[in-house]
Image (spheres, helix red, strand yellow):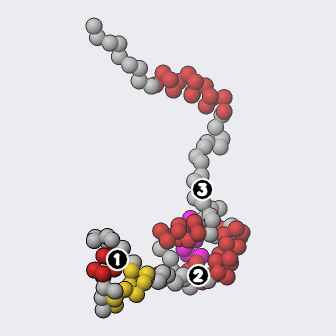
Amino acid sequence: MTRRGFAIAVAHPKLNLRGLAFEDGEYLGPLQHRSGRPTGLSREDRERLCDILDSGPVAYGLETGIWTRPLVGQVIEEEFGQRYHAGHVRKLLQQLSYSVQRPTTRLVQADVKQQRKWVRYTYPNLKKTPKPKAR
């Protein structure tokens, strides 16, 4: 069956034929799934990476207390010999069910009473007040 004959057979003159295989004008059926580029890390490597990440960066021998994408990429390159871009490290971590956690900023040595006083009394006075309406 030709492309035109296939389109007529399904009664659709402007049928989108992408995803269907034709050879010499003959319909062969749907295209097979394309798997894309093979993964760089095997299942065992991914499990080992999860163990490293779960143990923490200090246990791995790093100075910092948090994992960052460039650090994870560095660990992957050192341990498994695979080089990953930081953007792809994010995708890999999502596939491994890790989520982004952003640290909160707060003053550790601040006086809580002074902070509350500032928020309640000083800060509202600093905010702009609406001008009176002109008549």
Q: Secondary structure at mark 1?
A: helix
Crowd around label 1: few <14 · some 14–19 · many ≥20 (10 Å):
few
Q: Nearer the viewer, residue 74 or 96?
A: 96
The residues colored magenta run 68-75
Answer with the quarter of the image where residue 106 lies.
top right
| For residue 114, above or below residue 21 | above
Q: Nearer the viewer, residue 75 or 115?
A: 75
Q: Is residue 55 left or right of residue 88?
A: right
Residue at (29, 11) in percent of width and height: 134
Residue 88 horizontal/vertical position (percent): 49, 71
Q: Which mark, by number, is residue 41?
A: 2
Tell me the residue that label 1 is attached to: 9
Q: Secondary structure at mark 2?
A: loop
| For residue 68, above or below residue 25 | above
Answer with the quarter of the image where residue 97 lies.
bottom right
Residue 77 horizontal/vertical position (percent): 56, 80
Reading the chain from its start, which is encountered first: label 2 or label 3? 2
Query: Amino acid type of disc 2?
Result: Leu
Residue at (67, 82) in percent of width and height: 44
Query: Amino acid type of disc 1?
Result: Ala
Crowd around label 2: few <14 · some 14–19 · many ≥20 (10 Å):
some
Q: Secondary structure at mark 3?
A: loop
Give the residue at the far top of this rendering: 135
Q: Which mark, by number, is residue 101?
A: 3
Crowd around label 3: few <14 · some 14–19 · many ≥20 (10 Å):
few
Foreground tag (2 vs 3)? 2
Residue 113 horizontal/vertical position (percent): 66, 29
Residue at (58, 81) in percent of width and height: 41
Q: Is residue 53 left or right of residue 16?
A: right
Query: Amino acid type of disc 3?
Result: Gln
Reading the chain from its start, which is encountered first: label 3 or label 1? 1
Label 1, label 2: how far apart the Cα atoms are: 46 Å
